């Protein structure tokens, strides 16, 4: 129960959380394609070429860490933010707004999420000093407060303040409508603009799929380290409990032998009993996992419409099979060892 419950509950919640983060991005970002840099960012020359492609709107996004503070130099908080043009908010990037507005943004705007606003005591209209990675200190104004982020801070900074910092990615849309796919001519022009830059263009769905695969890889690596140790100890406990239990049932097995059961039949009975224990433990673990998944789904549904729930059937099935293997093999081996003694002699053993 512990082994299956740990694997099923933790992996289900982690993978569902990763899926919800991507679903939130899919709902908030309306881009046809994404330009992914080959190095640390997209250089200014490539960005100029993309901006000059007829009929295509290029939206540079620069991910960075910033610090905000007061005019007196007192630090308020450290935030991870995305620097975007003012025209992109409310069109290409549409985070759910709680207060303020994403239209008619000032040139030095800063949009923070609900968590930052509550923890730092910020509200729309407040003025703060933002320290950029370049070391520049720029005055900014809180233009809006959006819903709480699911993957760290969900904040946005005016791209006009970032200076020479290279964009982390560029969203592409046809100027005729946000989110619509580029036509063949526009795609060819984009590829020509990217020639020699090391960057490449991919669809937004493919970009999110790559993000999902990366998150899944990180989750699996963490599971091997954290859950692997817990699972190993749980299986050791299972084997230890079975060995002690079967050793204590020698008299019972002897009575079965005196009743006419042969050794092979007694081992089969013990193996069947252990298999039943695996089934019962799995059912209890499934109940615990279901309750945890439902609770998480209800909570995340308040933040994301149609929050997905991902159940890692492969890992759960592998854990159940491993538990069944260890249980049945240990029970069979321990029972075989406990029935080596002659039944008439073992029947006289005191409990």
Image: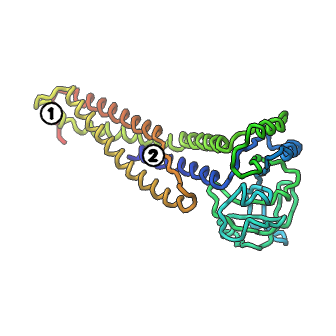
Q: CA distance from mark 1 to mark 2?
A: 38 Å
Instruction: State the mark number for residue 304.
Output: none
Q: Position of residue 273 (x, y in %)?
A: 26, 38
Position of 173 with respect to 298 (left or right) is: right
Q: Are marks 1 and 2 in contact (CB under 8 Å)?
A: no
Q: Residue at x 55, y 58 (%)?
A: 305
Q: Position of residue 261 (x, y in %)?
A: 15, 29
Q: Residue at x 45, y 56 (%)?
A: 294
Q: Local crowd at mark 2 within 10 Å, few (<14), some, or many (≥20)?
A: many
Q: Residue at x 85, y 67 (%)?
A: 139
Q: Position of residue 245 (x, y in %)?
A: 28, 40
Q: Is residue 93 above or below residue 339?
A: below
Q: Say which quadrant the C terminus sits in.
A: top left
Q: Secondary structure at mark 2?
A: helix
Q: Local crowd at mark 1 within 10 Å, few (<14), some, or many (≥20)?
A: some
- Evaluate whether residue 232 shows in this view: no
Q: Quadrant of residue 244?
A: top left
Q: Quadrant of residue 248?
A: top left
Position of 324 with respect to 258 (left or right) is: right
Instruction: Identify the residue position indicated by label 2 in the image.
Output: 8
Q: Position of residue 142 (x, y in %)?
A: 76, 69
Instruction: Identify the residue position indicated by label 1 in the image.
Output: 256
Which residue is most to the left? 259
Which of the colour schemes (rainbow, by chain, secondary structure, one colour) is used? rainbow
Foreground residue among 211 and 286: 211
Image depth: mark 1 or mark 2 in front? 2
Position of 242 with respect to 207 (left or right) is: left
- Evaluate whether residue 349 shows in this view: yes
Q: Secondary structure at mark 1?
A: helix
Picture mark count = 2
Q: Quadrant of residue 65?
A: bottom right
């Amino acid at each position: 129960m512990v082994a299956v419950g740990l694997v099923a509950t933790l992996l289900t919640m982690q993978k569902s959380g990763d899926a919800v983060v991507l679903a939130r991005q899919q709902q908030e970002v309306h881009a046809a394609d994404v330009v992914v840099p080959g190095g640390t960012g997209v250089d200014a020359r490539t960005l100029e070429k993309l901006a000059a492609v007829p009929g295509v709107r290029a939206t540079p996004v620069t991910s960075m860490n910033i610090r905000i503070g007061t005019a007196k130099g007192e630090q308020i908080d450290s935030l991870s933010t995305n620097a975007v043009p003012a025209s992109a908010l409310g069109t290409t990037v549409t985070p759910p707004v709680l207060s303020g507005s994403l239209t008619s943004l000032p040139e030095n705007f800063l949009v923070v999420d609900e968590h930052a606003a509550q923890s730092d005591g910020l509200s729309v209209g407040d003025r703060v000093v933002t320290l950029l990675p370049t070391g520049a200190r720029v005055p900014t104004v809180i233009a809006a407060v959006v819903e709480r982020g699911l993957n760290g801070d969900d904040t946005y900074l005016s791209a006009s303040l970032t200076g020479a910092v290279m964009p982390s990615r560029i969203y592409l849309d046809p100027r005729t409508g946000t989110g619509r796919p580029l036509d063949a001519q526009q795609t060819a022009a984009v590829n020509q603009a990217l020639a020699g830059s090391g960057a490449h263009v991919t669809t937004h769905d493919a970009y999110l799929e790559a993000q999902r695969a990366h998150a899944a890889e990180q989750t699996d690596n963490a599971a091997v380290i954290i859950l692997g140790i817990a699972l190993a100890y749980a299986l050791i406990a299972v084997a230890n409990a079975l060995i002690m239990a079967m050793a204590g049932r020698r008299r019972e097995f002897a009575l079965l032998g005196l009743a006419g059961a042969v050794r092979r039949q007694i081992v089969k009975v013990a193996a069947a009993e252990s298999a039943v224990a695996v089934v019962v433990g799995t059912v209890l673990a499934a109940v615990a996992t279901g309750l945890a998944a439902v609770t998480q789904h209800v909570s995340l549904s308040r933040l994301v419409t149609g929050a997905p729930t991902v159940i890692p059937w492969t890992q759960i099935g592998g854990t159940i099979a491993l538990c069944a293997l260890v249980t049945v093999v240990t029970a069979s081996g321990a029972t075989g060892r406990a029935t080596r003694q002659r039944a008439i002699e073992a029947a006289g053993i005191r409990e």
